[in-house]
Image (cartoon, rainbow, N blue to C red):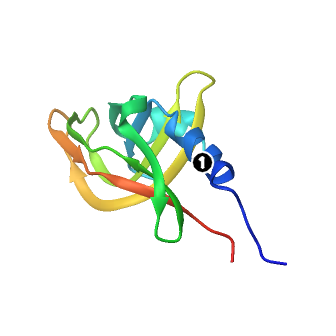
Amino acid sequence: MAKFAPDAVMDAALNYVGASLSCFVCSSSPTTWAEASSTYALATAVMSAADFAVADDTSGRKVTMASKLATAITVTGAANHVALGLAAGTTLRYVTTCTAQSLTSGGTVDIPTWKINIADPT
């Protein structure tokens, strides 16, 4: 029997991530909302539903996050992770790495467009 997952199954997971309203640039990999939003946060961008687009990908489904330009840096440090979360319920929803760079409080950082993929079952 072939393996199969309807797009709706993968979309449910991607839409869960896409309901995140905060994007944090972090100095370390957070494992909790508190770490993402405070302990490791260097910069925070406000997100909206319009910043997330779920679509087909070459081998499954993807959600693409829109770029956030000139995001204010509030803490000086070395950025190496980006985290998505939802303040309501203080839920950390996704963490990934980013290109390491030094950030200085008072400056700005651009968060480029990026995507999360879920592959079709094989």
Q: Is residue 36 visible?
A: yes
Q: Residue at label 1?
A: 11
Image coords of residue 64 (percent x, y): 40, 50
Q: Nearer the viewer, residue 71 or 60?
A: 60
Image coords of residue 92 (percent x, y): 57, 39
As drawn, the residue found furthest toward the right would be 1
- Residue at 48% from the left image edge and 58% from the top image edge: 56
Q: Is residue 36 left or right of residue 5?
A: left
- Residue at 17% from the left image edge and 39% from the top image edge: 108
Q: In this rendering, is residue 122 above or below 68?
A: below
Residue 2, quarter of picture? bottom right
Quadrant (top left/top right/bottom left/bottom right) for the N terminus: bottom right
- Residue at 63% from the left image edge and 53% from the top image edge: 10
Q: Is residue 29 visible?
A: no
Q: Nearer the viewer, residue 6 or 16?
A: 6
Residue 97, quarter of picture? bottom left
As drawn, the residue found furthest toward the top would be 88
Q: Amino acid at mark 1?
A: Asp
Image coords of residue 17 (percent x, y): 54, 42
Q: In this rendering, is residue 75 above or below 3?
A: above
Q: Nearer the viewer, residue 19 or 41?
A: 19
- Residue at 30% from the left image edge and 61% from the top image edge: 100
